[in-house]
Image: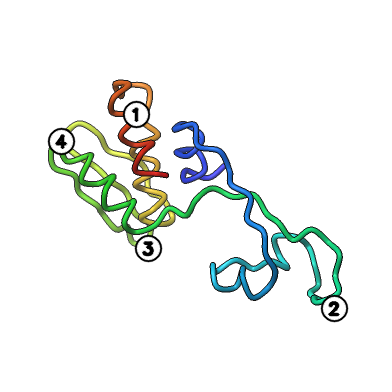
Amino acid sequence: MSEIEKIYENAGIKKEVIKGCYDYYSKLGIDIWKENDCAGKNCDTCKKDKSIKRYPPFTAEKQIEILQFCLKWGQVHILQGIDDEYRIENSCYRQGYQPTIADAIANYINEKWEKLTPEEKQQIKEILR
C-alpha cells in the first residue's frame, strides 16, 4: 500500500467508483487498459464493465493545504535527496526519503496519525475529500 493510499485509509475515506471508457479515463490521466486489463479492442461494442475504484486524487491543492496544516507544529522543510527522492522534516521529526513529494507529505501525516487529536484528524479528512 502506498503512503497516499494509507493516508486515505487512515482518514476513513472510501474508494470511489469511476465509470467511463477510454476517452473519459484518459482525461483523468488513467490508463484504463492497464487498470482493467483490457486491450481496448472494439471499445464501442465492448460489454465489459469499465468502472474502477480509486481514492480521490491527491492534488497539489490538497498537498499544499496539508503542508499549511502542518505548519502549526513548526517549520516544515522539504528536502530533495540525490536520487530525486524527497523527505519532510521539522525540528522534532525526520522521515526517510520517499519517491515523490506527495508520498513524503502523506508519509509525514501517516507517521503522526495516532498522535493527532480527533479535531486534527477531521481537518485532514476534510482536506482529502
- Spatial CA span between label 3 and label 2: 40 Å
Q: Tag 2: Cα neighbours inside 10 Å, few (<14), some, or many (≥20)?
A: few
Q: Which mark's residue is nearer the viewer, 3 or 1?
A: 1
N-terminal label among 4 and 3: 4
Give yes or no for contact between labels 3 and 1 (Cβ–Cβ under 8 Å): no
Q: CA distance from mark 4 to mark 3?
A: 27 Å
The percent position of residue 82, horizontal first and vertical second, equals: 33, 61
Give the residue number, with chain letter if any, for mark 2.
Answer: 42
> Could you tell me residue 5's position as x and y percent?
52, 43
In this picture the colour scheme is rainbow
Q: Are marks 2 and 1 in contact (CB under 8 Å)?
A: no
Given contact means CB atoms under 8 Å apart, are the residues at marks 4 and 1 in contact? Answer: no
Task: Kindly report the distance in space between the C-alpha atoms of the residues bearing marks 2 and 1.
Answer: 46 Å
Looking at the image, is mark 4 or mark 1 nearer the viewer?
Answer: 1
Q: Earlier in the sequence, mark 3 or mark 1?
A: 3
C-alpha distance separating marks 3 and 1: 30 Å
Circle 2 SS class: loop
Position in image of residue 39 (x %, y %): 81, 72
Residue on which disc 1 sits: 121
Secondary structure, mark 4, is helix
Which residue corresponds to mark 3? 84
Task: Of the two numbered discs 4 and 1 on the same chain, state the one appearing first in sequence.
Answer: 4
